[in-house]
Amino acid sequence: MNMTAAQRGVSPDGQIRVLVVDDSPSMRLLLQQMINREQDMRVVGTAPDPHAARELIKQLRPDLITLDVEMPGMNGLEFLDRLMRLHPMPVLMISSLTAEGSEQSLRALELGAVDIIRKRALTPKSEFLAMAAEVADKIRAAYQAVPHFRRRAPLRQVSARPLVHAGARFDRRKVVVVGASTGGTEAIKDFLEVMPPGCPPILLTQHMPEDFTFRFAKRLNDCCAIRVKEAEAGERLQPGWAYIAPGHSHMLVRRVTGGGYETVLSQGPEVNLHRPAVDVLFDSAAEAVGRHAVGVLLTGMGKDGAAGLLRLRESGATTFTQDEASCVVFGMPRAARELGASCAEGPPARLADLALAALRDRPEEVS
């Protein structure tokens, strides 16, 4: 299959054009060094504040920008909000590991930022190399989102969706497992906002740093009708709850003697370069839940979750993937589609409707 330059992660002229926006001269220089050491990307300009960045965007037409969350004057969030309304483009937020930095970064993802790059203590050298690798990987992922932003309309207010499934009866044997990566925070929100109280338990793996998953779960809990929390080891799954894999551990589901399921957290090796990994969750659900599972794979770069979704479908589970038009990055759903792992695809809210239909109680079924 022929792929566009953006899908391959390489710009048409061979390099991804990056604008760095940061009030710290040392951080601007550091990011420039990290980016320019890669053959497929280069810094085309740097700006100390959003006002200078606005002019450079017009002059240089970069493919994407890195943006510091905390800056004097117009801060990064204010600038991001205006940028997404007037000139949508991929943005990577540069964030500290503080509680305030985490909250601001999650708000940035809500406003349309593609992902977060964590500031690190750059000694020893291994920390510099780790941040440099993260910067390069996330720039490549963000570049794949260029088509999404080119077809994106300016942000608009969306009215709250009525809970059309409220009062429905659901099969108590069912469990929903969801995986996402780049662009997944808003896709997960769109999916969960459809879920009514009393729906079967939902387990979610989102590629996200451990400093962010607790606060991500809290923000979802504040806006959804169901309860959302960061998962803990050995939790008994309950209806009406969603459990987010903590950023430091794989999450698995395990059958409990006497009926029901519980969470398992693992510090095992990275899978598909990730911990938590979607494939780990999906593989465990294929084994423990089988045909009573519903698997959903949302936006993200790479292929994590594709093989696991196929194993779910082969176990008799119902499986769905996000469609290309609504994905920030179509990589993971594309990989699942190519494996024949998906029963149907659509935007997140539509997938929630399809999942709830599959979760309905059907008395004629037998275990």
Image (spheres, helix red, strand yellow):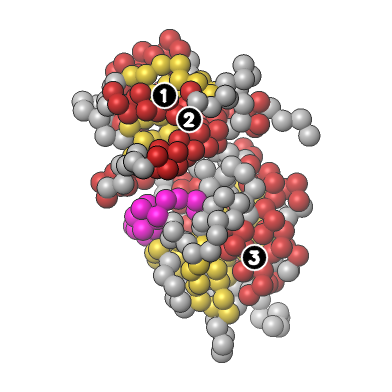
- Label 2 sits on what residue type? Pro
Q: If the image is split into quadrants, where does the N terminus sit?
A: top right
Pair 1/2: label in front:
1
Q: Nearer the viewer, residue 241 or 66?
A: 66
Report which quarter residue 260 is drawn in: bottom right
Label 1 SS: helix
Q: For the residues marked 3 and 2, what is the alpha-carbon distance in whole angstroms?
A: 32 Å
The residue that mark 1 highlights is 32
Label 1 close to label 3 by CB (< 8 Å): no
Segment colored magenta:
206-223
Q: CA distance from mark 1 to mark 2?
A: 18 Å
Q: Residue furthest bottom?
A: 258
Q: Look at the picture and state if 186 lies above or below 36.
A: below
In primary-sequence order, the first of circles 3 and 2 is 2
Tag 2 residue: 90
Residue 277 picture location, percent across and down: 56, 56
The quarter of the image holding the C terminus is bottom right
Say above or below: 170 vs 46.
below
Residue neighbourhood size for the residue with mark 3, other residues' Cα within 10 Å, grouped as few (<14), some (14–19), many (≥20): many
